Amino acid sequence: MSADDWWKYGIVYQVYPRSFQDSNGDGIGDINGIRARLDHLVSLGIDAVWISPIYPSPMADFGYDISDFCDIDPRFGTLDDFDALVREAHAKGLKLILDFVPNHTSDRHPWFVQSRSARTDARRDWYIWRDPAPDGGPPNNWLGNFGGPAWSLDAATGQYYAHSFLKEQPDLNWRNPEVRAAMYEVLRFWLRRGVDGFRVDVLSQIVKDAQFRDNPPNPDYVEGQDPFLRLTMLYNTDLPEVQPIVAEMRRVVDEFSDARSSRVLIGELYLPLPRLVAYYGLNAQGVLEGVQLPFNFQLIATEWQAAIIDRLVRDYEAALPPGAAPNWVLGNHDRARIASRVGPQMARLAAMLLLTLRGTPTLYYGDEIGMTDVPIPADEVQDPFEKNKPGMGLGRDPERTPMQWSTAGSAGFTTGSPWLRLASDWRTCNVEAQSRDPGSMLTLYRRLIALRRAQPALHRGSYEALEAGSELLAYARESDGQRLVVVLNFGANSAPVPSAQLPHKPTVLASTDPARAGPIEQPLVLAPCEGVVIGTESA
């Protein structure tokens, strides 16, 4: 095995720590709660755990406003608790990935407190400060993701500071080499504690235009959409100057890689394909020096139709630089859950798609039991995105609700009152109940993951698109002469599988229908929303 095998061929599982498991009854998930549930992750079969931010924070954006990059927020535990989590995860064969948030800090971070204290302060240039426009307003027209201008006036010093998100999240100045050096020391701090890699938040936005030019209007904007979309982010995202910084980050992380295991960088990048794959960092010598896994979010945003997904996969495979490892994502803490987007039956098909495509899959906690978005009443909303833009349906609370573990009080998540309300189905949709049900979503995930681990064709094989009609998505995975065929019916009607695409003596190795198994008597007809993995009888 190569040192890279774990992130190239393994499975990443995202934990949103506030909602995974509470160990002390305060209604908020924590590090010791994650430790208590590691066996669930082992039984599921995943390889790495990615944990959203657990650093000290005023929680204006639930941990993405960090006041100390090198400690643990008391809500989540202590550094000793974290060290114990690393040891126990590694002992169980699990890797640990942390969130790295380089674009901004909390406005209560000591760096920013010092920076805003005076124009002449040594850390003034650690953040992005500009004089007002001639009319006294913001320096340019850039918008904040959470509403309003991307600038706030500091009355004491008479200048505006930039913030791509909330005003409580001032942007760092990554053009300053002192900032880069300080942030790279943050990476080293956690790597020395045994962390196996980082998911890098809003990576493409860390460098802004040196001339601070206005962004142009978005010609595709439609009234009624999020006002943030009125402008095209030409001058404050994905600038060429980002790429050398990504290469620097990679070199820092590579300092801690060895022959046994490499460290990984995963980039959060909502970008079109040509711009996304640039973050692999293919240099003139043909070496990949960027993030190993630029997150591929296409399955989150695409229409759920066979022909569209087939084209999407083909285009992605064709766009990958030589030697690059692909990856796929169905959901995360910022997007509606897959079962809510496509429905419970199609979510089973989505699970098979995710776990049989070529490349590293990332699972979002709770998707393995089919959790859905939970409507949150206005008086219970927590997310600043929704509070700042009420009524637009942009809030992320619905996909962040507590994990549903059992029929115990509060679904086994807490002995107290959960920070967000539970789904109404928690008494039947939970890990405990689904572990006993051979037809459950959890059983399907476990079987698919076990099959993926057991079959080299699925975890490291090549990908070949197959023709199978308008409603079927079909592809072959092959490794060392072993060929498996995956067929997924995205249609509302039953559909026959072309016999020419089936292997010799075909047999079902896995199906979204628990009743289907074993040798196939042709013709093979798939029910609506049914998917199968087909091998030969000897496979």
Image (cartoon, helix red, strand yellow):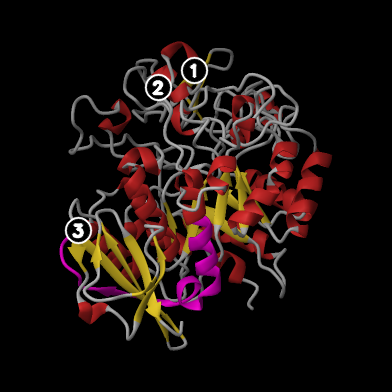
Residue holding disc 3: 494
What are the residue bounds of the magenta stretch? 445-470
Q: Residue furthest bottom?
A: 481
**Residue 194 image offset from top left, x and y in percent:** 76, 55
- Residue plotted at (49% across, 53% down): 438
**Residue 501 image offset from top left, x and y in percent:** 25, 78
Chain-order first, disc 1 or disc 2: 2
Residue holding disc 2: 138
- Residue plotted at (45% across, 54% down): 295
Chain-order first, disc 2 or disc 3: 2
Mark 3 nearby-residue class (10 Å; few <14, some 14–19, many ≥20): some
Residue type indicated by callout 2: Pro
Mark 1–mark 2 contact, CB under 8 Å?
yes
Q: Is residue 538 left or right of residue 5?
A: left
461 in the magenta segment: yes
Residue holding disc 1: 153
In the image, residue 386 sits, relative to residue 471, either above or below, namely: above
Element marked by disc 1: strand
Residue type indicated by callout 3: Ser
Q: Nearer the viewer, mark 3 or mark 1?
A: 3
In the image, residue 510 sits, relative to residue 427, either above or below, namely: below
Q: Residue furthest left?
A: 470
Chain-order first, disc 3 or disc 1: 1
